[in-house]
Image (cartoon, rainbow, N blue to C red):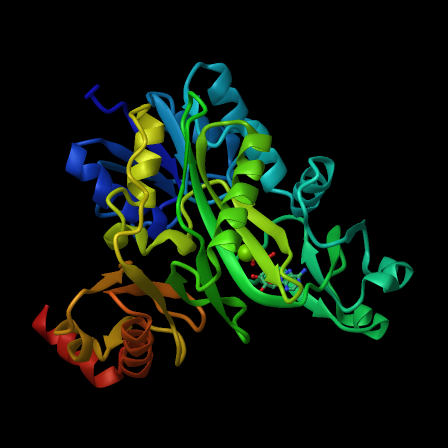
Amino acid sequence: MAKAPVIVLLGGGQLGRMYIENALRYTAEVHVLDPDPKAPCARVASRFVIGDFRDKETVLRFAADADVVGIEIEQVSLEAMEELKKQGKRVIPDPSVLRIIQDKGLQKQFYADHGIPTSPFALIEKRTEIAAHAHLLPAFLKTRTGGYDGRGVMPIDAVSDAESAFDGPCVLEERASIALELAVLVARAANGTEVAYDPVEMVFDPKLNLVDHLRAPARIPQHVADAAKRLARRVTSAFGEPGLYAVEMFLTKDDELLVNETAPRAHNSGHHTIEACASSQFDQLLRIHCDWPLGDAALRSKAAMINLVGEGGTGSPELIGADDILHLPDTFIHLYGKHETRDGRKMGHVTVLSATDLGIDQAIAVTKVHCRVEPMRAKQREQQTNNN
Ligand SMILES: Nc1ncnc2c1ncn2[C@@H]1O[C@H](COP(=O)(O)OP(=O)(O)O)[C@@H](O)[C@H]1O
Ligand SMILES: [Mg+2]
């Protein structure tokens, strides 16, 4: 096996942290840039630099000694990525891919241009234009840049909703009648070889608009699973560049598959692969970064992944109910080491494996009933301070 190159990662959140956990198995060195000195990667990276990954000069300085430049968040300096590629570094995702994906408008247009099914849409500059596209209602309005985890997405039921809508450049897209939300992860190597994971089924929290839990494999007929994998690979071959891609799609009530959006990086919909597959999404990404052969993506067991999302306000996080699930078989707790919990913030996740759908149902229910992340209560905080 060729020695691992020096890998730099822009962004130091949980995706970076899980990437590093795996990279350490191969003694690969990962350097991380993030503005937050207490980011999840701060204490696990080989080198952690505090700085803004949106700033071109900061990124160029940080990545000067890198062989490989990777991301764990899309909102990084595109200009820096372009410049680093010119310098001969392996930049993944390719800047041409990142440019399209950073802008939901360009992304939708890309699908349309490549004949990839996606819900009908219009690109608008300001909210007063919504009325001219009333035929798309009920719709979703999405800011073209900067949104994530449901922020930057709002439902528009009627033209009157336009008054309180986002007012910048947006995508207005017809609301799909969704039977299931699916995601397919595809790993694409530099030589064009691809490996696709089995589609997963994502269950969204309707209030937070982010993934509550997922099940793998998705409970869909084999021919739909095959079609979802084929569609995901149409997306990745249209991009035509190496990388790890998470293709989110809707299965409509008419059994149609529509691509929603693609993330060119590790993704929440692939966390179960750490325990449920021989080669996890993080392992696959490392292999792509190092130009090693891709790994085995076959699902070894049915699995569910339940996000632990902050509730009950802001403060030092405390995982409640862990004792009730720690003794369960095939159950894995992941905490991201964030120093502050907030309502709706992803603080960790639990993965469960089971041979049966019933086992998965029960594990999801038990985890959701017992486990939650809340701000530490004052008394405990006091106790902890005294102990330290
Ligand atoms: N056209 C649509 N029809 C129906 N639901 C949608 C549509 N677009 C988005 N949604 C819902 O909103 C969620 C978030 O939208 P998405 O574009 O994936 O934004 P984010 O970047 O926050 O993940 C989707 O997972 C889905 O539940
Ligand atoms: Mg999404």
Q: Residue at x 44, y 53 (%)?
A: 199
Residue 206, relative to residue 68: is it above or below?
below
Q: Residue at x 68, y 47 (%)?
A: 117
Q: Position of residue 98 (x, y in %)?
A: 55, 35
Image quarter of residue 111: top right
Decide if residue 369 is in sight here.
yes
Q: Residue furthest right?
A: 132
Give whichever of 195, 82 is nearer the camera.
195
Q: Position of residue 207 (x, y in %)?
A: 54, 76
Q: Residue at x 77, y 69 (%)?
A: 138
Identity of the residue drawn at 23% across and 24% down: 4
Q: Is residue 42 above or below residue 8?
A: below
Q: The N terminus lies in which quarter of the figure?
A: top left
Q: Position of residue 381 (x, y in %)?
A: 21, 77
Q: Is residue 65 left or right of residue 263?
A: left
Q: Quadrant of the C terminus?
A: bottom left
Residue 384, located in which quarter of the rendered image? bottom left
